[in-house]
Amino acid sequence: AMASPSIASFGSILNACARDARWAHAVWLLSEAMPSTSVEPDAFALGAALNACARGSAAARALGVLQEAAAAGAEGSGKPELNAVIFNTVIHSCGKVGYWEGATHLLEEMRRLEVAANVISFTAALTACKRGGRWQHAVDVLEQMADAEVALDRVAFGAAISACEKGRQWQWALGLLGRLPGSRVEPHSSSVVPAIAACAAAGLWEHTLKLLRDFQATSADPGQLSLNAALGACQSGLAWAQALWLPPPGGTEG
């Protein structure tokens, strides 16, 4: 007689599915094949299936799998306990495709289930909001991060400021940039460049040039995109004299 499949054998196949991004096969194994053989999925099996979804950019399906696991756990059916690593896998998959609804919902679920969100949880959700063009939600996630006493880092600020740039919210972009010193975060191109772009898009050449000069004073190169944005702002504001003093990329003022 053939030996019954074990949790170890299912785990090996699920890991192979995750490696090859075969998310549909992984979900079938988890939700149908394992129950049909009376093998109870553990946290590793669930994590592998979710990894397959993440690598296959199947964020919505990953969210569905996680919700099914949470519902089963609430019914006391012995499903694996959900932890931050499992949640972060799905939030990360949401971030890859800009699925901000899923990412912010999962942060709410973590609070409801008393699973502590960490810097990975919040930055992945911020990435989802940035890619989804939801600046209000990005700002809200940043505030949640601060309220949870998770240290705000340059990745978090950069994602939130980029979301504000996409939403043409230059006031919010500057406000968040102004919070860097209080959060002990050094200015970085990931946060300063989108703030420059936001001001430039609004035609605020004074703000644009000040940000550019302040950033270059730190010996940082803002890049050609920022210089082009500054030139554009000066053009729209008819500030050609100021534009003539813009240094070349990586250069210094004469």
Image: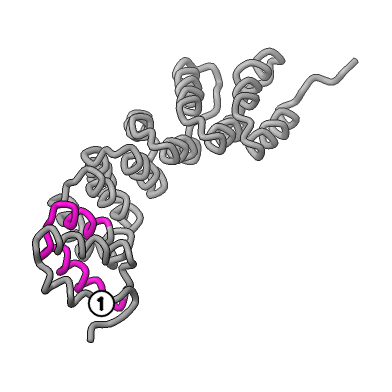
Range of residues picked out in magenta: 194-219
Residue at image location 12% in from the left, 69% down from the top = 240
Residue at image location 9% in from the left, 63% down from the top = 238
Prevailing secondary structure class for the magenta stretch in the rendered image: helix
Q: Which residue is mark 1?
A: 247
Looking at the picture, which amino acid does disc 1 mark?
A: Pro
Coloring applied to the structure: one colour
Residue 225 at what x, y percent from top left? 31, 61
Q: Secondary structure at mark 1?
A: loop
Instruction: Decide: is 230 above or below 253.
Output: above
The one nearer the camera, 207 or 125, is: 207
Quadrant of res 34: top right
- Can residue 111 be seen here? The reply is no
The quadrant of the rendering that contains the N terminus is: top right
Quadrant of res 236: bottom left
Q: Is residue 197 magenta?
A: yes
